[in-house]
Image (cartoon, helix red, strand yellow):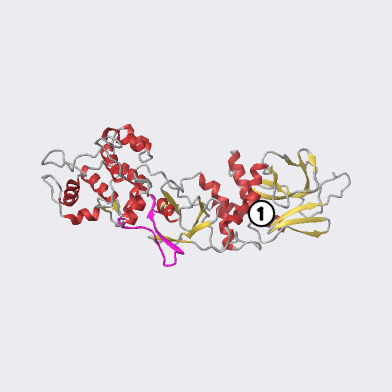
Amino acid sequence: MGRCLRISMLAILLTVALSLQPATALAAGSNGQQSAALLYEMGLFRGTGTDKNGQPIFELERAPNRAEALVMLLRLMGLEQEALASGYTHPFQDVAKWSDPYVGYAYHKGLAKGISDRQFGGSGRATAAMYVTFVLRALGYEDGGNASDFSYAQAVSFGIQRGLVDERVSAGGNFTRGDAAIVSENALSQFLRTGEKTLYESLQEGGALKSTAYWNAGQTALDVPVSSSDDQQSYVLSRITLQHFFPDTAHVLFTSGTPEDSPFYLSDRYSREELRFIEALSYEKHYSGSDWVTVSAVLAVPGVTIYLTDSQYEVLGWCRVPDKPERIREVTFKTATGFDGATLSADYHRIIDTVAQNWDRNQFELGEERYAPRDDGTGISYIRPVKRNGNYVDSGWYCIIFSYPPGNGNTTRAERIEKTEQVMATVFFFSDRSLREYQDSDWTNRYISDSEFQYPKITEPGAPASRGIRIYEHSSMERDVYFFTRDGVYLGRTSIPASR
């Protein structure tokens, strides 16, 4: 019974590890909240006030006016401070005091005109065409004249072609401050018309960004500012910032929120630091289907470790997001690691990739014959011989049994493969012993950590020439049995229904 209990405990550990996925997901932010928060941190977007907690109020659902659109143009061109200090005047009589220096500067530089000789029309509504035109100008494109890149009427469609504008903007209707924030954020990753650098790089080099990442003296640690996610439970990092400082980034990997002292991190072959990276590899497929990484943002969940790697999974930078409840302003990405990420990835994929490769090759089942090796007083312990593709087998395989609560079964092929890959990772990486053999009466056991790989020598008269696994028949939960070789090649799986 002790061995069965140890198997169940490891099953629980795996189940807990699989369930330690933060509930927060990075939504697309259709109202522009995340874009506005990111731009606010950079000093490129201002609120119209603050709430009782001191957080900015963005009013993202209303339309921007012409004055707000003009200010955003100057910020995206890195000219805000120059405009505020310029002292230029203008002929307009309807300009609000707060926007007076911006209008004077833009008028003097030929960046904006009024709706008449005396009226600027700053309180008038800014349309999508107007705002996109401003942003395209910030990127260096020209409208009007013989050498123009686009016309005012074509501004939105021109922006769509370059990935600056979402297609829904072209459908007409209301253009909001949220839409303006999204377009502005998209512009940061756009190359300037000259093609030499992105708008973000240009603003950063010109010192126009209020909040940006910065290296320590030895360039071994990068402090990256964060903004709050929509639900205030997690943080958002600018992927544009990360890509700028780690330009070879090809993969963004996340661990679960597993505590640092978790018994899940046990192995006599890998360090705790290596196991944490292997755990992140095991979650890559799961997170690739979520919104944790978008074109412009990376979600930073408290307690999670984030790795930035190149195409070969060599770690470029990593950070552990603080799990303390107080709010933070930045996280630190370190460049030094105590392991070779490319080698660990190769070791990991050598085993894990066999799951998909061999998924439909073998059909395993447990024979109906049952042999009680000894009377343990329970009357429920039996040995079931193992069949592979209809024939009894006696060597070349190992197995592990996991129990799952009702309702946790996966339904799609991809989900079943992903769960099996997690099991293989647990068996071959998150264990404190290597596969080894010991003798116990008529049993030969091969096991890793607290899991046992039972190969009883069936000697009863009439028994097939086979080895089997010991099963405690009466269980309230369905159990999955996974089969593989000593070298980590996945062979197949079968299920044991819950007892009725």
Query: Which residue: 58% across, 61% down?
Result: 339
Q: Position of residue 187 (x, y in %)?
A: 35, 45
Res. 327 in view: no
Q: Residue furthest front?
A: 146
In this image, 278 relative to 371: left or right? left
Examine the structure image and report whether residue 281 is included in the region drawn in magenta: no
Helix, strand or loop status at disc 1: helix
Judge left or right: residue 337 versus residue 175: right
Quadrant of the rendering where the C terminus is positioned: top right
Q: Is residue 454 above or below residue 156?
A: below
Work out whether residue 90 or residue 338 is closer to the camera in this orientation and state it: 90
| Residue at horizontal 77 percent and vertical 56 percent from the top | 445
Instruction: Say what amino acid the circle numbered 1 marks.
Output: Val
Q: Label 1: how many residues lie within 10 Å, few (<14), some (14-19) or many (20+)?
A: many
- Residue marked by disc 1: 427
The residue closer to the viewer here, 420 or 184, is 184
Position of residue 262 measured from the top left corner of the image (x, y, whole percent): 57, 61
Vertical side of 39 occupied by 159: above or below: above
Q: Is residue 19 above or below residue 156?
A: below
Q: Pinpoint residue 189: horizontal percent, then vertical percent.
A: 38, 47
| Residue found farthest to the bottom | 217
Q: How many marks?
A: 1
Displayed quadrant of residue 266: bottom right
For the record, the magenta segment spans: 207-236
Question: Can residue 265 be spotted in the picture?
Answer: yes
